[in-house]
Image: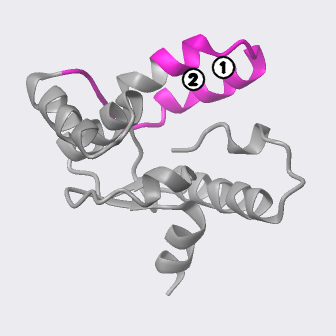
Amino acid sequence: MLFNRPFDKQFQTNIRLETEAKIHIQQDILGGKYELVLSCVLDYENGLSPYLERKNRIILWKDIAIEMCYESDSVLADAESLEKIGVKMLDSLHIACAIFTNCNYFITTDSRLLKKPVNMIRIIDPIEFTKRECV
């Protein structure tokens, strides 16, 4: 779940819209409309961040998540399959965790990732997700 989007410079319209959609989704998670699943990769990536405020705000979502997915043989096998179609290693692990935990969606703003032919889970951007869920 694109935790860092609100910290990006908001000069471009699409970034502002993605930020608003992301905040809307998070409010719906807090309100019980959706459930959040996190992957162990989030801990790894968040630990690499030099920005203390970002780290602290992101880590709070661990208490809200209904599940934290950790590395397993199944996750690693799915991640390896995803890498074979050109998904980057960390992204493939995030997606593999979402697949392993039976998530319905993997929400991202990564335009390259959105174009990958992944058929094991629906990869969607936050704006499209919000539009779909409002219909």
Q: Secondary structure at mark 2?
A: helix
Left or right relative to 80: residue 111: right
Residue 106 percent location from the top left of the image: 39, 52
Q: Which residue is mark 2?
A: 59
Name the image colouring: one colour
Residue 72 percent location from the top left of the image: 15, 22
Give the residue displayed 54% in from the left and 49% down from the top: 110
Q: Residues within 10 Å of mark 2 (few under 14, many from 20)?
A: some
Q: Is residue 50 above or below residue 18?
A: above
Q: Secondary structure at mark 1?
A: helix
Give the residue displayed 24% in from the left and 42% down from the top: 82
Left or right relative to 82: residue 5: right
Q: Which residue is mark 1?
A: 55
Q: Magenta residues?
A: 44-71
Is residue 107 among what the camera can see? no
Q: Is residue 82 above or below residue 29?
A: above
* Closer-to-camera residue (115/3): 115
> The disc labelled 2 sits on which kind of residue?
Ile
> The disc labelled 1 sits on which kind of residue?
Lys
Number of the label disc, if any, that sits on residue 120: none
Q: Is residue 37 magenta?
A: no
Residue 127 percent location from the top left of the image: 60, 68
Give the residue displayed 90% in from the left and 54% down from the top: 11
Looking at the rendered structure, the number of numbered marks drawn on it comes to 2
Residues under numbered marks 1 and 2 in contact, where contact means CB atoms less than 8 Å apart: yes
- The CA span between labels 1 and 2 is 6 Å
Q: Is residue 74 above or below residue 51?
A: below
Residue 36 percent location from the top left of the image: 42, 45
Q: Which quadrant of the structure image shows residue 25?
A: bottom right
Q: Residues within 10 Å of mark 1 (few under 14, many from 20)?
A: some
